[in-house]
Image (tube, coloured by chain):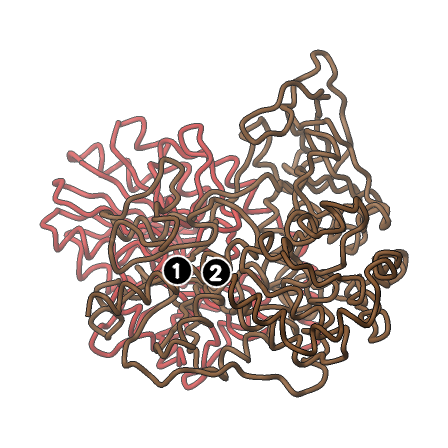
Chain colours: A red, B brown
Amino acid sequence: MNQIIKTEQFSENVVKLVVHAPRIARARKPGHFIILRIDEKGERIPLTIAGADEKAGTITLVAQKVGVSSQRLCELQPGDEILDMVGPLGRATEIHNVGTVLACGGGVGVAPLLPIVEGFKKAGNRVISILAARSKDLIILEDEIRKWSDEVIIMTDDGSYGRKGLVTAGAEEVILREKVDECVAIGPAVMMKFTALLTKKYDIPTQASLNAIMVDGTGMCGACRVTVGGETKFTCVDGPEFDAHQIDFDELLLRLGGYKQDEVDAFERYLSTQK
Amino acid sequence: MQEYLKMEREQAWRIELRNQIKNKERTALPRVKMPEMDPQERICYQDREVNLGLDVENARREASRCMDCVNPTCIEGCPVSINIPKFVKNIERGEFLEAAKTLKETSALPAVCGRVCPQEKQCEASCFYTLKLKKDPVAIGYLERFAADYERESGQISVPEVAPKNGMKVAAIGSGPASLAFAGDMIKLGYEVTVFEALHEIGGVLKYGIPEFRLPNHIVDVELDNLKKMGVRFERNFIVGRTATFEDLKEEGYCAFFVASGAGLPRFMNIPGENYNGILSSNEYLTRVNLMNAANDEFDTPVLKGKNVAVVGGGNTAMDSVRTAKRLGAARAMIIYRRSREEMPARVEEVHHAEEEGIEFINLANPVEYFADEKGRVNRMRIQRMELGEPDASGRRRPVVVEGSETDIDVDVVVVAIGVSPNPLIPSALPELKVSRWGTIEVDPESMQSSIPELFAGGDIVRGGATVILAMGDGRRAAAGMHRYLTESK
């Protein structure tokens, strides 16, 4: 059940997992996510699907160590099994031919961005991708993104790879240079917030995919609520993608910190049991 | 039905039993008291049941209060029409396993219903004692629980007979009480039944919603095992319409579907500050504790433990939440309810237990705004006083705002338990399905058939929000309706 076929360490805290899940591999579309629980004690973790191989019956996930459960997920090896996995969840990305699409990915946000980039390219768009991270070793899936992009711009905070600067610097340059019809931004909430502010200035429709806290992922708990255009929405069933110009990112940022202290406490407990 | 009841009542043992004790003596007996765990002790445990159950002697004495009426009005009060006098009289004569068998003739989950049904509004409300004698009714709920528990503890659990397989495959979507009742009936009729559940646990609200101190999980598991023994298949982590489409499942041989996907979306009040951290739905709060074991440090899922916890609402879910908060160590655990105690939809017993446990009731009050610290964590709520006006559509007196009555309460966790809206997952997968403007699936009330002929529905996805037993009643009617549809269409 949900056997891990392959793993790849992208960086110290980021791991790619290829998991056997034939039904999900067949049904998923760009933008969809899954929820998994590694074992009886694990949390339910939402992860956006980074790709799928329908023939092999596998899906690709990219996980980052942030708490105990994700730490344990990142330590799994090929042959190990994930106890529970359900999906695909959420609404699929609306992909159509609009002209030129600017795809901005920050950190592990590049993983969910990949199928969307692929989708837009296949729909006949010109796709310009910007990959951003703190440093070179945190830039992931560059080759895969290149395959479906007309141009790729790499931005790093420390200048260790590509150009030095934030994602917004790269994005603004493109916007000033040519007509951009639509923008997609996936990454840390702060990165999406500033990308949205930039594209709003230039009046470019922008979608952002949110990584809210979730429990069930089917609309039942409301942990993932977010304010969009003044209305409360549930990220799991109404999203995860929303009109980035309507999202209350400041509220989202506060809500993402809602269990910070519990996570820190749990992580310390976990480390003490590992000694 | 009437004929069958009459025939059963005329059995020799029933006549003999009736003649043993005079009715006058029966009615002179006081109603039994349910032994309970001490309130101060029980609030230290999340998973210890409050009600301890009747012993043999008390159960038989209570059963002897029942007069085995010619016209058993109690049955009319039961949504699944349990033959109440028959099971009660079996307890009186000491045939406890027979009593359990009687329950299972019509109910797939007697140990559950004996614990969570609002008997005071159903069977016990239409007991002869209540209606005519103006006395405390026979404790039918306690006796139901007694019979089911006795059977389970005896290790001699009877598995109902199943008809030979008829070769037809049907699916139930969701694994809560409606689906379990449906599955139990359909498997008896010879269908191949698969129950699809979105979560990683079978049982729906019985597992994620109702806490262990009211309904222990191992009790639900025994009832699920029984269904498995009868041949019902369970598929967890499977969302019909997503993991596979209805078309996919039809290709896999399923010829009809029963949708009982429950009331998904928790309602909020849409008042300022409601999205601050520390304010959560009862669904989230209870799911973290009941399904994810968040109160136990060995499990990874966290839950917010507050010192001052306010729970908004007056239903069973509100009681479950506030009593959970008390057990997680809250110094103040409060109910904020906009009507008065009399209008509370919660079971009387739950309100009573909550009071014993030191829950504060701030009735005739409604939240209007929340305030938070610099990190966005709620630290204060503003409430407004209410008074009761004219009755509204539900027959309950409408709460009216008392102007200028705002006061503030310190809180660090707020649980909103004001109801749920239907889960949109299934209707969104079937655009041709007829739904009401509230998003509930529209069905024929007799057959539970929807606008799509091979699709039936029941439970909260049809009712919007109801009880375990009403959901089970829907499951049973849907099973009968689907059976009729499938045999006639052949």
Is residue B272 positioned above or below B296 on the image?
above
Is residue B359 positioned above or below B194 on the image?
above
Q: Residues within 10 Å of mark 1 (few under 14, many from 20)?
A: many
Mark 1: amino acid: Ala
To which quarter of the image does residue B191 belong? bottom left
Name the foreground residue: B441 vs A242. Answer: B441
Question: Residue B204: x and y, percent?
Answer: 52, 62
Question: Residue B218: x and y, percent?
Answer: 66, 74
Disc sitting over residue B178 in the figure: 2
Q: Would residue B382 be visible to someone looking at this image?
A: yes
Name the foreground residue: A120 vs B234. Answer: B234
Locate the C terminus of chain B by quadrant. Answer: bottom left
Asked whether, in this view, residue B363 is left or right of residue B303, the answer is right
* Tag 1–tag 2 contact (CB < 8 Å): yes
Q: Is mark 1 on a helix, strand or loop?
A: helix
Badge 1 or badge 2: first in the primary sequence? 2
Question: Residue A75: x and y, percent?
Answer: 51, 76
Mark 2: amino acid: Ala
Q: Residue at x 35, y 81 (%)?
A: A5
Asked whether, in this view, residue B137 is left or right of residue B469, the answer is right
Disc sitting over residue A25 in the figure: none
The chain letter under disc 2 is B
Q: Which residue lies furthest to the left in this view?
A: A124
From the image, tell me which residue sits under label 1: B478
Q: Would residue B249 be visible to someone looking at this image?
A: no
